[in-house]
Amino acid sequence: MTILGVPEQALVEERALTLFASPEIASARQDLLALFRADRNAKLLDQEALIVRSVEEHLFHGCLVAANETPHDPRFVWSITPAHDWMGKSIPGSRFGQDNTDNIYRVSTIDPACSYRIKGRFAGPLPIDFSICALPAQIGEHMAADVVGFINMALIDIADDGSFTIDADPTATDGRRNHLDIGRAKSLMVRDTMADWSVERPSSLTIERTDAPAEDRYDPKAAAARAADLIKIIAGFFLDKIQHGMFEVDALNHVPVPVPSGARGGLITQCATGGYFRLGDEEALVITTDRLGAGYLGVQNVDMWMISYEYRNRTSSLNHTQAVADADGKFRFIVCASDPGAWNWLDSSGNACGSLLFRWQNLPTGVELAGCISSEVVRLDALRDRLPPETRYVDAAGREAQRDERYRGYMCRLTA
């Protein structure tokens, strides 16, 4: 057993795999393919394989959620992750919604009239951030998140052995520590944010009812219908409201000033910004930004169908521990389809278009956001002249070593 590979996870995945093979999901697959193929971005080059991948991952996430909608016998289940083999099974990917590659996402379904106890333990170096958001529906179910209850490490007393307990019930928190108000919530979203993948570890987590005995009312037939409906809702919402409504509203190849994520229905301790890019074969997009004193800065590119580009062994994402800052303290990230030789390359797996997302978590109070980020398209043959002289470069062997290190760090999620 590992931190994430627990019996509760295995049970829900087994149920989800059965749903994934159901006629209801087969029908939903065709509906989602039609939705994405009719979208304006489907006309861009080389999108079909990305569309198919996104559809499949949306589908499996919906199956995981529907298989886990047992609020009277709840479980935390890891989702929004690439495909992987573990616990004797091949598990499809379940990413959607511009997933943060530094996050372990876990979801649970609850009843706002019930009371629960969440038990957890940090079994090693703490993740750089940990939070639980109480939501009025499943994320993407006609909303981005719309947080109605929130708790993070600053609001939790953690014992010397790393253990903690959180009471979750429909009463107001009123300053109580280790308490989560779920009075208007139907689901929980957990984020363990890990900056150093090789060192930081997610929490172990369980949840149980405290007001009555657990009762697993899982109904496979109802779950299949629910999964099919939920998948279409989530995919349609994120495509319209997030991909088109947030990432594609500003100028092409431009990243606007970040804004608080809570104002957009996201994580309330985060500021974020995003844009979209399309580049020629000989072009690169250089983005300059500052950590701004944040506890965490993460940067990534994703495809036009809201799925992270390969990040386990490619640098489609970088955070403040993985990237290299220049002498002025700023980070300069390079986006282009082919390897420019710079350490801070955001690798889009050979794709010349996609979306960009920048996240700052736990910023200092009163920090100035205006002017903290800029972007510029430059020719690849002029790139070195536009970057500071101290820019770190790598040859083919250095890039391979960087990728190997990422992969080893990522695999800790499956084996630790």
Image (spheres, rainbow, N blue to C red):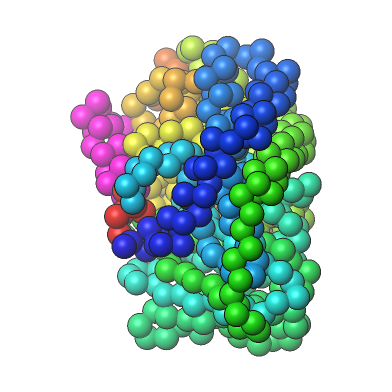
**Number of numbered markers:** 0
Question: Is 36 left or right of 386, judged from the image as shown?
Answer: right
Q: Image point 41% across, 20% down: which residue?
A: 338
Vertical position of residue 113 compared to residue 11: above or below: below
Where's the C terminus, which quadrant?
A: bottom left
Q: Which image quadrant for residue 341?
A: top left
Indicate whether residue 405 is drawn in magenta: yes
Indicate whether residue 244 is drawn in magenta: no
Q: Residue furthest left?
A: 397
| Camera sees residue 64 | yes
Question: Is 392 left or right of 102, judged from the image as shown?
Answer: left
Residue 168 location (% of width, % of height): 64, 78
Q: Nearer the viewer, residue 331 or 241?
A: 241
Where's the N terminus, which quadrant?
A: bottom left
| Camera sees residue 194 | no
Vertical position of residue 202 compared to residue 156: above or below: above
**Magenta-tinted stretch:** 385-410
User: What is the chief secondary structure element of the magenta stretch?
Assistant: helix
Q: Nearer the viewer, residue 240 or 324?
A: 240
Residue 356 location (% of width, % of height): 58, 35
Q: Image point 73% across, 86% down: which residue?
A: 174
Q: Which image quadrant for residue 54?
A: top right
Q: Nearer the viewer, residue 138 or 288?
A: 138
Vertical position of residue 86 compared to residue 356: above or below: below
Question: Is 108 left or right of 317, judged from the image as shown?
Answer: right
